[in-house]
Amino acid sequence: MRFYREKCLAALMEQLGDWMSSIQIQKLVFLLTDNQEERVYDFMPYKYGCYSMQLSQDLRNLTKDGYLLCEDEEGTSHKYKIARNDLKLSKLIDETDYNVILRIIKRFAKMPINELIRYTYQNYPFFAINSKMAKDLLSKTEYSHVINQRPHKDELSLMTIGYEGLSLEQYIVTLLINDVRVLCDVRKNAYSQKFGFSKNQLAKACEGAGIRYEHIPNLGIISEKRKDLKNQSDYDALFDDYEITTLMYARNELNHLFTLLQNDKRIALTCFEHNPLQCHRSRIAKRLMTIPQCNYTLLNL
């Protein structure tokens, strides 16, 4: 186990002892993190409420490494249990976090799964906005409260966002809070060594959060041109070249982006860099904003 979050997860599973479904584990860890001084996982609103793709991946990793056992349940769900009860994993984590684990288990571990899900929906309604189950589990008043948590903004906006420094879950929550309806990935190669940000993972996360994902590789910059960028002047020179080469011949792609803006009203261009001035998405946005009919607000998230 390389990461502290994995140690916390394994310690929780050790104290649970018995089989738990992946949905139960997601809810228990969500409640755990809400009581931690420093959260070990971030969560986003997903198909069954609060969900962490990193947590899901860690469950698979701990199973692969022999710490957990896994069995298939109906559909695509799984259930897990600790492989051995003599590992004393609680010694690997802070005493404060261990005590939080014990409190969470005492209060919630034996709660029926639908009651546990309902509890999270009632107390954390924002995380239920994309749930397929909320309407069936909640009263009309409670469900109405969940629906009202979904951000809706009327302002016509072109946005840009980089995922540098963000977990996938933080990134998706940022998109939701800003009512991004279409995410346009302008990387040449939509591959990342950072978990969650390669094309298929990111598209899946967006789909589960109710955001449309499009990859537009023709607007990207080949990686060879990004070598040896040491200061802002280097970035500026690269993007000046980008404007008179790639963007000059990207009329179809720019027209497509403008059509998305007209139809969906709030779209975001995405790449890696946090600072938009060090990312070519800023030049794409600049070009779009020069279109005479483009009466949109430009926001860098």
Image (cartoon, rainbow, N blue to C red):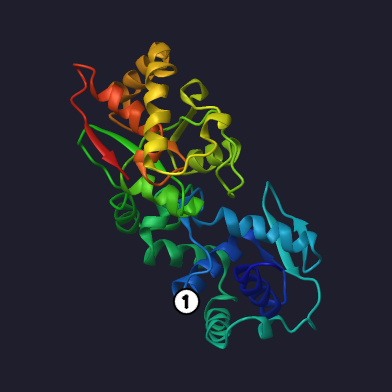
- Left-right relation of 104 to 4: left
Q: Quadrant of the C terminus?
A: top left
When the figure is inspected, residue 48 is found, relative to residue 180, above or below; the finding is: below
Q: 252 or 183, which is in the foreground? A: 252
Q: Nearer the viewer, residue 33 or 128?
A: 33
- Position in image of residue 37 (x %, y %): 44, 77
Q: Position of residue 152 (x, y in %)?
A: 26, 43
Report the quarter where the N terminus lies.
bottom right
Answer whether residue 219 is visible to the viewer in this image.
yes
Q: Note whether residue 269 is visible.
A: no
Q: Secondary structure at mark 1?
A: loop
Disc 1 marks a residue whose amino acid type is Gln
**Measuring 40% from the left and 51% from the top, which residue is drawn there?**
173
Question: Where does the image place residue 79, in percent across and percent down from the top left?
Answer: 71, 61
The residue that disc 1 covers is 36
Q: Characterize the local packing of mark 1: few (<14), some (14-19) or many (20 or more) Cα atoms within 10 angstroms.
A: few
- Image side of residue 64 versus residue 52, left or right: right
| 39 left or right, relative to 300 | right
What's the residue at 33%, 59% (across, down)? 142
- Choose between 245 and 229: the one closer to the eye: 229
Nearer to me, 261 or 235: 235
* Res 265 quadrant in image: top left
